[in-house]
Image (cartoon, helix red, strand yellow):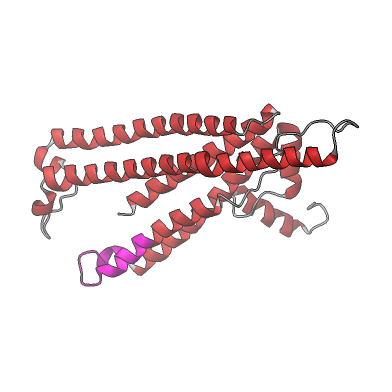
Amino acid sequence: GLEHWPLWRRTGIKALRAIHLMPPSAERLAAFQEHYGPGVSFLFSWSSFFVQQLWLLVIYAVVWMAVGVRSLRGTDDRWVYEVMKAGVVLWSVWVAFVSTWRYTANLPGVGGPARTSDISEDAITRELTLKKAVRRAKLLLVALPTLTVTVVMVLATFVSVTLLVLRVVFIWGDCINLHTAEMVCRDASVKHSILGWAAEVACDVLLAVLFELFNWAGSSVSGWIAGLWKYDVQSDALLLKGMLELCLAAIERVGFVGCLAF
């Protein structure tokens, strides 16, 4: 605990944990898991980790702003600006990758039959080995392709919406020709007035609707995959379902941030 530490040190650590620059203490996570279950403990741990990664993105953005990268967009040094955008995409990939192995849940498998004098230890071992092989085959041949297709669909949709916005602004709104050093054109409303503004708002509404649809799709896919494992204890299946939902939600948000970089 922190009670034996100096006051200044306790205050500093509590402040860092309050803004999620430090992970929650092991005692707090253990208390969460004991009182609320492993699912809540996982939510708490993952949200703290994600906020820590957002602080990295804040520092990254501040450094590039101090360099004055925005002033390089229309110059021969535009490649520096592209490097900055690529860094945001790499951050997105990093968060999505690290979040898959940062939390290793202890999910008990399907319990084997009770050991009695009529069942040999070899028979029990063979049955448990077979069940483990079946679960791994389902993970490899069913769950993994399903998750991959879901993630690809999510990212492809966000890219499509981003391209739609660019088309509305630069093609339909003709900003590709109207934008000059004397006149700034970054909105379709410059050419189409209220109609152009309404078109951009419609794109934002479409994105919000897609977020809701993907939340529902992620929950459905996660529940279906958790059902494939056929856990004996419902809490184990709910924990796996919650982990999958969080991973898919993280990829959705992170993928959206990556799309915004371009």
Would residue 258 be seen by someone viewing this image from the given angle? Answer: yes
Task: State the image quarter where residue 151 is shown.
Answer: top left
In the image, what residue occupies the spot 36% across and 69% down?
A: 67
Q: Is 18 on the left or on the right of 176, as rendered? A: right
Please provide percent x and percent y for residue 165.
23, 43
Quadrant showing the C terminus? bottom left
Q: Is 253 on the left or on the right of 230, as rendered? A: left
Part of the protein shown in magenta: 70-86
93, above or below 253, in the image: below
Check the image and name the residue furthest to the bottom. 76
Task: State the image quarter where residue 205 is shown.
Answer: top left
In the image, what residue occupies the spot 74% across and 49% down?
A: 26
125, above or below 184, in the image: above
Q: Is 87 on the left or on the right of 73, as rendered? A: right
Which of the two residues, 49 or 117, is positioned nearer the viewer here? 117
Please provide percent x and percent y for residue 243.
58, 39
Please provide percent x and percent y for residue 7.
76, 56
Would residue 173 be seen by someone viewing this image from the given angle? Answer: no
In the image, what residue occupies the spot 17% across and 42% down?
A: 168
Which of the two residues, 149 or 88, is positioned nearer the viewer here? 149
Q: Is 165 on the left or on the right of 157, as rendered? A: left
Q: Main secondary structure of the magenta part?
A: helix
- Tell me, yes or no, whether the highlighted magenta stretch contains residue 77: yes
In the image, what residue occupies the spot 54% across and 30% down?
A: 223
Image mark count: 0
Please provide percent x and percent y for residue 61.
41, 60
Which of the two residues, 81 or 107, is positioned nearer the viewer here? 107
